[in-house]
């Protein structure tokens, strides 16, 4: 009786049996144990993440410049003068808030991907807003990051309505544990956040192929806007995707992290951002409890491997 | 690693148990020695009884002896003083307490005032010592009276109740029993009635004694003491009202004197009389707790408790002492139930405001402020202001709305308007800011959901903290806060599923 689906509750016993990781358990037994507080700034500040990533040889969108203070905002044209296109984003933003993409511009007209043009004054105001903390968590003063535009691979064009499809990989003790692709929908307003109504596609960690897809917690087979068959999704360069996640472990020291990865048409998989407190919705998209996966890693995975060895271990193990 | 966490949990559990044991003992102690109770009885009656003794001196040295109440389980003496200049005072305790006043010969009519402040101590328990009295002497009656008494007692046996009650009922029967006139040829005064009851009971071999006391009634002036008859039945003294035949000390009855001795003896005086007046006043129970502690020789501990503070500070602390319980509810709602609310303690502060405003006026007023605030915030978002000035503008706007509501409420005599002032301004402004940001980013449904759950948690908290009993208990037995502290800390190690997760993750469940 679908009408009463919203009434469906499971017993804690059933969830335990399914190996579901709950919020309290995640916070108490995973995050507070494996993620040291002092490491958080490394992933909460995109500038730091980017610099670390470059050192660790992880692909990220190239950094064009940083605007730290209000009086520097007027330098924006000087900063981007060698680039035809650029992205402005807050260093402490989350969930794609405050990201402004410019694909073409003249002195006073800046074109966004949707075709809308904004004036210099509006661009100036947007950067000011970022600095004042409008988009940052907690509203503290922020820094505007200007970086190169990612040329999204059109492989996924059919699978996403506007917006950018990205791959989230959960990495536990350096081993990729679970992954999903997030596809924007009309309902999610072009954003890739599941709680806003984006589609979550659980991916087989060994192959990068679809396991299952959900939207608003309910299973679906086709994208609601593009009608693409979600079962046909296959993420290319899967090993490279996983390698980015695995390397992020050494790079940050976080035992439990989420890596958001996008696929650039020319440069391949690129790390967009890292998250020290990745959400638990990925379990629903995969139809698998995360706790059982983490337990498996705790029990039977070898230690002391390099990122490459860890990825190969995961790929060979599950293939 | 897992072992380490078990230890944390064990330590906290141990601390919780210890704090519970401590709280349990402390509650017992407060009830026993300070007269605290679980019921929120804020006021205790305090009675002032004044005995006015007057007599004309005969020219000899004067000795006045007045029976005074000793403490009983019902009443404790708060203060006692005697207004009798030129008299020397001595206390005598011989069965019943007496005050003995002596003075050299006087010539003018004398007035002595004995003043006593009692408070109702029924909350605290005690025992009365009752020695076994000797068997009474048979009354000395002529033959006619003797047979009348026998017949009367026979008829009395048809009445209900125990023996003294049967006798009293028959004596007070209306129309009077034919034999009453024979037994009681004189005026039917309390004194004569009591004497007859005593004699009749003595005939039956029941020891009796007369008790004199004062029935405390508000603003009763110049009355004579009431008489009661006590009969020793089945190893206990039982007291009877000689008019109603009711057994037991009537409510608000203070016994001054028991047994054969008189209430007042005056030597060196004549035409002596004693008239009583009683005055009732109320005093806060917590205020009297100090007196109770003193009586129980537990004063020093009391000095360092909340209840010895000035009333204004007590009220502030009383307000605080409910917070831990509200915090516990918040912790439960967030970590065990799993409802997402705006800000951690916002619902708690909201519920505190509702306690002050009253539920319906508070909710209506809050809704109006939030609705107008949100409208204003949507206009503001068009201006693209920086964060701090924007939230500041919302704060100022909230203040203006509150002022307007209060003024309108006063002008149009709407009760709701005046409750506006009780909402915390900054919190209200932040709720508006958060709601509007969530609205813009996650849509009106999510914003509505956040506000709804915040209000729901606030309402649940409100119903708990607005309960008079719970508030009283949390203040009177503030050691419970220690218990709550450890419960909250123990909840900090709770790693089970949240209630909302049982639904959220139900697609993953395996049977």
Image (cartoon, coloured by chain):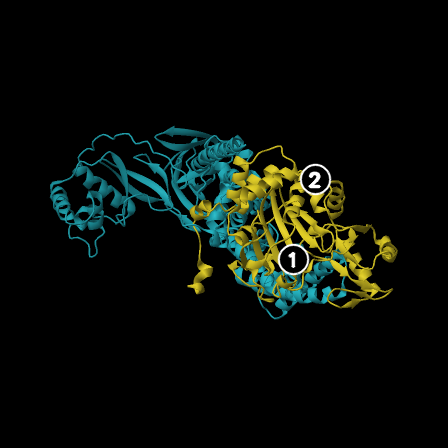
Colour in which chain B is shown?
cyan
Residue most extreme to the bottom: B412
- The verdict on a common chain for dots 1 and 2 is yes
B445 left or right of B84?
right
Disc ID at residue B491: none
Assess disc 2: are there few (<14), some (14-19) or many (≥20) residues with their C-alpha within 10 Å of its C-alpha. some
Regarding mark 1 in the picture, which secondary structure is present there? Answer: loop
Counting from the top left corner in percent of width and height, residue B28 is at 43, 36
- Please determine whether, in this image, residue B267 is positioned above or below residue A3: above
N-terminal label among 1 and 2? 1
B53 left or right of A122 in image: left
Query: Tag count in the figure?
Result: 2
Residue that mark 2 sits on: A251
| Residue B329: % across, % down | 52, 48
Image quarter where the C terminus of chain A lies is: top right
Disc 1 crowd, CA 10 A, few/some/many (<14, 14-19, 20+) = many
Q: Which mark is residue A165?
A: 1
Above or below, comparing residue B405 to residue A14 in the picture: below
Q: CA distance from mark 1 to mark 2?
A: 24 Å
What is the quadrant of residue B36 in the picture? top left
**Which one is nearer the viewer's eye here, A218 or B372?**
A218
Q: Residue at x 56, y 40 (%)?
A: A28
Of B160 and A125, the residue lying toward us: A125
Q: Colour of chain A?
A: yellow
Chain letter, disc 1 residue: A
Looking at this view, is A286 or B196 the one in front?
Answer: A286
User: Where residue B434 sits in the image (x, y, percent)?
Assistant: 65, 57
Contact (CB < 8 A) between labels 1 and 2?
A: no
Q: Quadrant of residue B209?
A: top left
Task: Label 2, secondary structure: give it.
Answer: helix
Asked which quadrant contains residue B363, the reply is bottom right
Quadrant where the image shows the N terminus of chain A: bottom left
């Amino acid at each position: 009786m679908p009408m009463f689906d919203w009434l469906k509750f499971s017993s804690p016993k059933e969830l335990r049996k399914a190996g579901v990781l709950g919020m309290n358990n995640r916070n108490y037994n995973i995050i507070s144990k494996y993620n040291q507080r002092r490491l958080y700034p490394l992933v909460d500040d995109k500038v730091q993440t980017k610099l670390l990533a470059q050192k660790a040889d992880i692909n990220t969108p190239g950094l064009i410049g940083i605007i730290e203070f209000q009086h520097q905002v007027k330098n924006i044209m000087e900063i981007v003068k060698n680039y035809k296109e650029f992205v402005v984003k807050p260093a402490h933003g989350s969930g794609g808030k405050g990201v402004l993409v410019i694909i073409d511009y003249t002195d006073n007209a800046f074109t966004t991907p949707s075709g809308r043009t904004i004036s210099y004054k509006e661009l100036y105001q947007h950067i000011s807003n970022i600095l004042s903390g409008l988009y940052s968590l907690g509203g503290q003063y922020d820094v505007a990051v200007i970086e190169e535009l990612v040329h999204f691979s059109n492989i996924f064009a059919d699978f996403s309505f506007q917006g950018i499809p990205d791959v989230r990989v959960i990495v536990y003790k350096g081993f990729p544990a679970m992954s999903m692709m997030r596809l924007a929908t009309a309902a999610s307003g072009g954003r890739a956040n599941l709680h806003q109504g984006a589609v979550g596609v659980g991916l087989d960690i060994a192959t990068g192929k679809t396991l299952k897809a959900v939207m608003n917690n309910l299973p679906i087979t086709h994208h609601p806007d593009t009608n693409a068959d979600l079962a046909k999704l296959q993420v290319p360069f899967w090993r490279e995707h996983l390698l980015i996640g695995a390397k992020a472990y050494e790079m940050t020291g976080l035992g439990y992290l989420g890596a958001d990865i996008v696929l650039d048409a020319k440069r391949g998989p690129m790390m967009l951002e890292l998250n020290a407190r990745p959400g638990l919705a990925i379990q629903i998209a995969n139809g698998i409890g995360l706790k059982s996966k983490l337990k498996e890693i705790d029990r039977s995975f070898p230690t002391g491997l390099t990122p490459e060895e860890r990825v190969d271990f995961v790929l060979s193990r599950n293939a | 690693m897992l072992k380490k966490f078990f230890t944390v949990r064990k330590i906290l559990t141990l601390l919780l148990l210890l704090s519970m044991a401590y709280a349990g003992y402390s509650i017992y102690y407060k009830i026993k020695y300070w007269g605290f109770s679980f019921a929120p009885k804020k006021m205790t009656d305090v009675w002032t009884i004044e005995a006015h003794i007057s007599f004309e001196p005969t020219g000899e040295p004067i000795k006045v002896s007045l029976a005074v109440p000793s403490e009983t389980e019902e009443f404790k003496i708060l203060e006692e003083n005697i207004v009798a200049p030129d008299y020397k005072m001595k206390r005598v305790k011989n069965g019943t307490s007496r005050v003995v006043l002596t003075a050299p010969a006087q010539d003018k009519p004398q007035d002595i005032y004995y003043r006593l402040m009692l408070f109702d101590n029924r909350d605290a328990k005690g025992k009365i010592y009752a020695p076994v009295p000797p068997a009474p002497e048979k009354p000395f009656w002529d033959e006619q009276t003797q047979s009348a008494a026998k017949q009367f007692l026979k008829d009395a046996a048809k009445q209900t109740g125990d023996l003294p009650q049967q006798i009293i009922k028959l004596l007070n029967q209306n129309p009077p029993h034919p034999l009453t006139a024979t037994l009681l040829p004189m005026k039917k005064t309390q004194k004569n009635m009591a004497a007859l009851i005593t004699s009749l009971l003595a005939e039956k071999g029941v020891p009796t004694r007369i008790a004199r006391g004062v029935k405390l009634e508000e603003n009763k002036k110049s009355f004579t003491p009431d008489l009661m008859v006590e009969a020793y039945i089945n190893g206990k003294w039982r007291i009877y009202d000689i008019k109603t035949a009711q057994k037991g000390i009537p409510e608000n009855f203070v016994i001054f004197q028991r047994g054969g001795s008189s209430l007042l003896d005056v030597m060196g005086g004549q035409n002596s009389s004693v008239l009583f007046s009683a005055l009732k006043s109320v005093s806060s129970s917590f205020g009297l707790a100090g007196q109770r502690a003193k009586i129980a020789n537990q004063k020093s501990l009391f000095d360092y408790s909340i209840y010895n503070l000035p009333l204004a500070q007590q009220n502030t602390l009383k307000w605080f002492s409910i917070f831990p319980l509200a915090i516990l509810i918040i912790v439960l709602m967030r970590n065990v139930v799993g409802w997402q609310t705006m800000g951690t303690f916002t619902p708690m502060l909201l519920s505190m405001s509702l306690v002050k405003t009253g539920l319906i006026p508070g909710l209506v007023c809050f809704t109006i402020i939030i609705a107008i605030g949100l409208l204003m915030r949507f206009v503001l978002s068009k201006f693209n202001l920086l964060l701090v000035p924007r939230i500041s503008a919302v704060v100022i706007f909230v203040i203006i709305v509150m002022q307007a509501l209060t003024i309108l409420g006063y002008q149009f005599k709407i009760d709701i308007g005046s409750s506006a002032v009780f909402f915390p301004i900054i919190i209200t402004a932040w709720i508006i800011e958060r709601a509007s940001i969530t609205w813009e980013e996650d849509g009106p449904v999510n914003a509505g959901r956040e506000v709804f759950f915040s209000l729901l948690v606030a309402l649940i908290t409100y119903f708990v903290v607005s309960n008079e009993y719970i508030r009283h208990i949390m203040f009177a037995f503030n050691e419970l806060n220690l218990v709550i502290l450890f419960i909250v800390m123990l909840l900090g190690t709770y790693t089970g599923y949240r209630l909302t997760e049982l639904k959220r993750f139900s697609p993953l469940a395996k049977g």
